[in-house]
Image: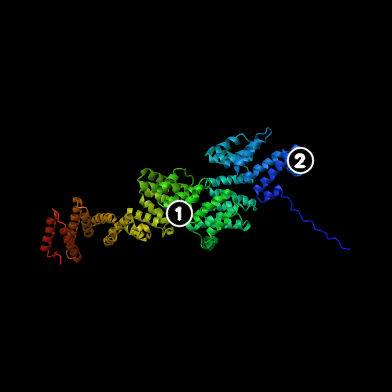
Amino acid sequence: MRSSAVIPMRKVPKMPELDDFLSSHDYEGAISLLNHKLKARQMDQETGQLDKEARQVDQEAGQMDQEESLYLWIAHCYYRLRNYEEAANVYLYLMQKTDAPGELGNYLACCKFHMKRYLEAKKIAEKSPKTPLHIRLMMNVSLRLNEEKRILHYHSNLGSAMEDQLSLAAINFYRMHYQDAIDVYTGILRSTPTMIALNVDMALCYAKMDYPHVAYNLVKNYLRSYPDSPFAKNLLLSVLYRTITSKTTVDDQSELALNIDQEGMTMVTDMEALLKQKLYPEVEYLCKHNLVLFKNCETALQVLPSLMKHVPEARLNLILYHLNRNYVKDAMGLCREFDPITPHEFLVKALTCLRFGQDYGSKEQLVVAETFFRMVGEFALVQDTIAGRQASAAALFLSSKFDDVITYLESIEMYFTKDDAFLLNLAQAYLMCKKYVLAEEHFIRVSGPERDKLLYKSMLARCYVKNKRPQKAWDMMLKTTNPTDRLSLLKVIAHDCYSSMEFYYASKAFHEIESSDPTTENWNGKRGACAGLFRQLANDRQEKFLIDRMREIIQLVASKPHSNCEFLLKVIQMWGETHNVNLTSI
């Protein structure tokens, strides 16, 4: 007799519960489940039955109405998804009920706060119970509305609970009191070491304070426990990028310094991989913004405009993109649409006003630029940083206080040994203070396209003349092919050589100028320079090079006859005959 085979029963997977979705941060799945429960409950109510799972949720909610409990969980999930509009709609629906809890007003106000409707949030919260959440919310609302007295009032009512302390740290961060925020985070970690996510918050503070190696170590510490955290990965890449592109010094033995070359090479691919993950909208916006920077702004015009309402830095980097490409009017248009708050925002707006003022002759914008530069330089957070000292130097430069400009720029020169813009600014300050040797040294170190510009050549020519090397100025003029630039350089050489008693080159320069512009003024300049050279010869007639130069200038003067030319040449020739100095060309 054949024995019958026992067919094993297939294990049916367990239906996920609400806690399963919440613990895995799958809030969309949780909303689907809750909506299903809500519809099932409504159907059961129609048939007079209640689902067992619905009763379980009701028991967990205590005496709270079962339907209201489901709606509250739905609102909570929308809130965690940053879909504050939908969360607010749910709270508004619940508040219409006659027995609605008063705390719903605070929940609704929180949604309005995140939607940046601060006046609405304030109005709603003021009618809600004065709970710890209410105090934290109102302190943040008051901060956004710049109501200083109310900030202090709610600050004094904060408790010692962790939520209150975290809110205080957030307030300090928003006000750029980064060290105060770090102190709060450190205190929490001391009492609750398991809150390692605070490492990321502290890293953000240290990054803002230009301590990249500390920020790097803190983020790395967090990523060892949570290697898939998108926000932490983005912050780590941002720290790497800022360290590579800025002048911030890093200890050679730090973990950041040891890894920066290798990790810096994969920034773009790492960010692209990060963007393939499912991200919160805010993190996705940040990553898209940062990827544009990592790619040297190749896609700036395609990506950054759509991010401006989500990422404040997108507007700033789009402004800088336009400035770097000399689209000054486009940059100025973007600047007019925002009011700066942070030092970096003031700095970008100052740079834009400066460029606009210089390019379009707007004294008003130059005054605005000077004011903003000064504000950045005096800001406690940045005044002793490289950026702060550059800002102070820029303000002093615009107010023509060049001695002070030199003091500031010399203190940070070691970080800009190959930076053309910095070298030009410092060289100009030396030039204005008549420190011609230092000015020439710094002008010569410029290696980029600025060397071909007329302003650069004019200033370097002046340094050459003042440093008693007019021949180099003359040679630079001869190599200049643009006729307009060449004439401008001749004028600089002519007047500077005349005032420096380099009359030989002054005579030659005025002669060239007079050839293209035969005015009385130019003739008088040539005559004066010729007379000056003659006087030098008369005082030292044994110098052969002076005799040779005098012969050359006599020929130049004679080659272009003038009504006063004959008398001048006659006087010089008579002196030569009297003192046995042959001034006739050989």
The label shown at residue 173 is none
Element assignment for label 1: helix
Q: Which one is earlier in the sequence, the residue at label 2 or at label 1?
A: 2
**SS at badge 2:** loop
Indicate the quadrant containing the C terminus: top left, top right, bottom left or bottom right.
Answer: bottom left
Seen in the image, is 439 located left or right of residue 572?
right
Where is residue 484 drawn, in percent x and y? 28, 54
Q: Is residue 454 visible?
A: yes
Packing grade of label 1 (10 A; few <14, some 14-19, many >=20) is many
- Residue 483 in the image, given as x and y percentages of width and height: 27, 56
Circle 2: residue type: Leu
- Can the viewer see residue 540? no
Could you classify mark 2 by the number of other residues whose Cα lies within 10 Å: few (under 14), some (14-19), or many (20 or more)?
A: some
Residue 481 lies, with reference to residue 19, above or below; the image says: below
Residue at the image point whose x is 33% and y is 53% from the top? 432
Judge by depth and name the residue closer to the eye, 35 or 417. 35
Q: Quadrant of residue 409?
A: bottom left
Quarter where residue 467 is shown? bottom left
Reading the image, the residue beneath label 2 is 50
Query: Could you tell whether 291 is left or right of 105 in the image?
Result: left
Q: Position of residue 283 (x, y in %)?
A: 57, 50
29 or 441: nearer the viewer: 29
Of residues 212 and 330, the one drawn nearer to the viewer in this rendering = 330
- Residue reaching furthest to the front: 1
Amino acid type of disc 1?
A: Ile
Query: What residue would you read off at disc 1?
Result: 386
On screen, residue 490 versus residue 86, left or right, reads: left
